[in-house]
Amino acid sequence: MDPKWDEDQPIYRQLRDRVVAMILEGVLAEGDALPSVRNVAAEYRLNPLTVLKGYQELVDEELVEKKRGRGMFVNDGARLKLLKAERERFLDKEWPKVLATIQRLGLDEAELLRSTHSNDKAGDEND
């Protein structure tokens, strides 16, 4: 997890979002244990209650489950649930802005595809 915090959003929410990103990216798989509240608090110099609040949001969303005395674990189906929600959010909130920008700039599909392929090749060369 990145130790830098954004001042515009509560830390517990950023912590929740980082765990979500780790699930989406496959860093945390279904059944994996989340880092302990105590370890995260110590590593990032956070109040354990802040960490617990971020984790509790994940429990409330049914993405992770508390196992008494053992910790918190990623629920089965958490990644698929997150992918569905993120795709819906992107299509509802982000895509209309992207599409409006594409139209405002007069870009066409062929240009966008060429740009995508150029960026893919540049990325391959840097690997």
Image: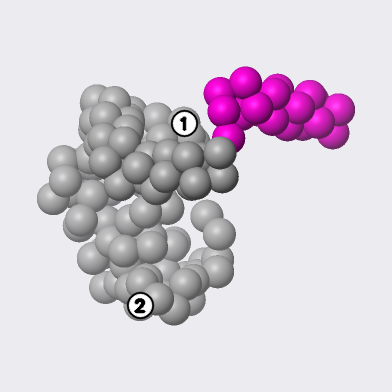
Q: For this view, does 16 lie left or right of residue 28?
A: left
Q: Position of residue 53 (x, y in %)?
A: 23, 65
Q: Characterize the magenta stretch by its predominant secondary structure.
A: helix
Point 57% across, 28% down: residue: 108
In this orientation, which residue lies closer to the viewer: 102 or 126? 102
Q: Which quadrant holds residue 88?
A: top left
Q: Residue beneath label 1, please?
A: 26
Q: Position of residue 109 (x, y in %)?
A: 56, 23
Q: Position of residue 62 (x, y in %)?
A: 16, 41
Point 13% across, 50% down: residue: 60
Between disc 2 and disc 1, the foreground one is 1
N-terminal-most mark, 2 or 1: 1
Rendered position, 3 above or below 84: below
Does the magenta run of residues contain 7? no
Rendered position, 74 above or below 110: below
Rendered position, 42 above or below 56: below
Q: CA distance from mark 2 to mark 1?
A: 27 Å
Amino acid, disc 2 = Asn
Amino acid, disc 1 = Gly
Rendered position, 40 above or below 89: below
Query: On the rendered image, what quadrant is the C terminus found in?
Result: top right
In this orientation, which residue lies closer to the viewer: 111 or 66? 111
Q: For this view, does 95 lie left or right of residue 64?
A: right
User: Which residue range is magenta in the image?
Assistant: 107-127
Point 23% across, 50% down: residue: 58
How many residues crowd mark 1 within 10 Å: few (<14), some (14–19), many (20+)? Answer: few
Specify whether residue 110 is in view.
yes
Mark drawn on residue 47? 2
